[in-house]
Amino acid sequence: MKVVLHICCGVCGIGTIERLHDEGHQITGYFYNPNIHPFEEYERRLKTVNIITKLMNCSLEDASYAPKEWLEQTANLAEEPEGGKRCEVCFRMRLEKTFLYMQEHDFDAFTTTLTIGPQKSAEVINRIGREIGGDKFLVRNFKKQGGFLRANEFAKRFGIYRQNYCGCIYSMR
Ligand code: SF4
């Protein structure tokens, strides 16, 4: 299938692209992450995603940086813990935009790297993905079968940047 993969960062991209290629899909990466703060960090992650998609023979669409709407939608959720309601809003925004891109460009399906994160609930992400796109959303849990560890090992081997916080201004604390 022709699949749009929402990619949050380089390490997560490595683990998921590998898995989806093994499943026989043709992947286009989609970098839409208005949550990332500050802009320098956004640029760093985008640069890394450019490197890994080239390494893995996968095309990439950069949806450009637009943090204003993200900040507005999460403004009253600043005190939420990581994994709480703010993250659900954050997942939904990114997946909605990926779904629109999928529809506009005649892909068969979409999914996201987000489920590979050890701190992120695949159940919540998959539920949101299905609410947005129905069966066009590929339900996956990329952290299974050591997905995150393998991605980290690959990143270390190739000197790929690995960030130490999720991305938003709140997660920097
Ligand atoms: S902690 Fe991560 S998933 Fe949650 S709102 Fe911040 S950037 Fe988004």
Image (cartoon, grey):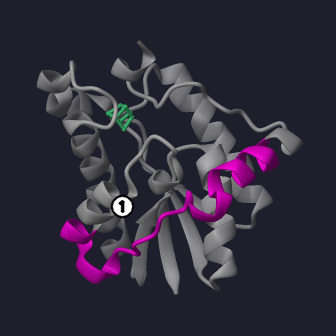
Label 1 SS: helix
Q: Does the magenta stretch include residue 105?
A: no
Query: What residue sits 26% from the left and 58% below the top?
Result: 96
Residue 19 to residue 172: above or below:
below
Residue 84 position within the rendered picture, expressed as x and y whole percent measured from the top left = 25, 36
Query: What residue sits 42% from the left and 47% below the top?
Result: 32
Which portion, as a residue range, is magenta? 130-155
In the current view of this chain or complex, which residue is farthest to the right? 157
- The crowd level at tag 1 (other Cα within 10 Å; few <14, some 14-19, many 20+) is many
Residue 89 position within the rendered picture, expressed as x and y whole percent measured from the top left = 21, 43
Residue 72 to residue 33: above or below:
above
Q: How many marks?
A: 1
In the current view of this chain or complex, which residue is farthest to the left? 76
Query: What residue sits 32% from the left and 37% below the top?
Result: 83
| Ligand 1 location (quadrant) | top left
Q: Return the residue nearer the eye: 70 or 90.
A: 90
Q: Return the residue nearer the eye: 129 or 57.
A: 129
Residue 17 position within the rendered picture, expressed as x and y whole percent measured from the top left = 64, 65
Q: Does the magenta stretch include residue 142?
A: yes
Secondary structure character of the magenta stretch overall: helix
Query: What residue sits 67% from the left and 33% below the top?
Result: 162
Q: Name the residue under label 1.
A: 98
Residue 154 to residue 42: above or below:
below
Say left or right for 142 vs 145. Answer: left
Query: Image quarter for residue 90?
Result: top left
Q: Return the residue nearer the eye: 94 or 60.
A: 94
Residue 134 position within the rendered picture, expressed as x and y whole percent measured from the top left = 23, 78
Amino acid type, label 1: Thr
Q: In which quarter of the image is the C terminus?
A: top left
Say left or right for 165 vs 160. Answer: left
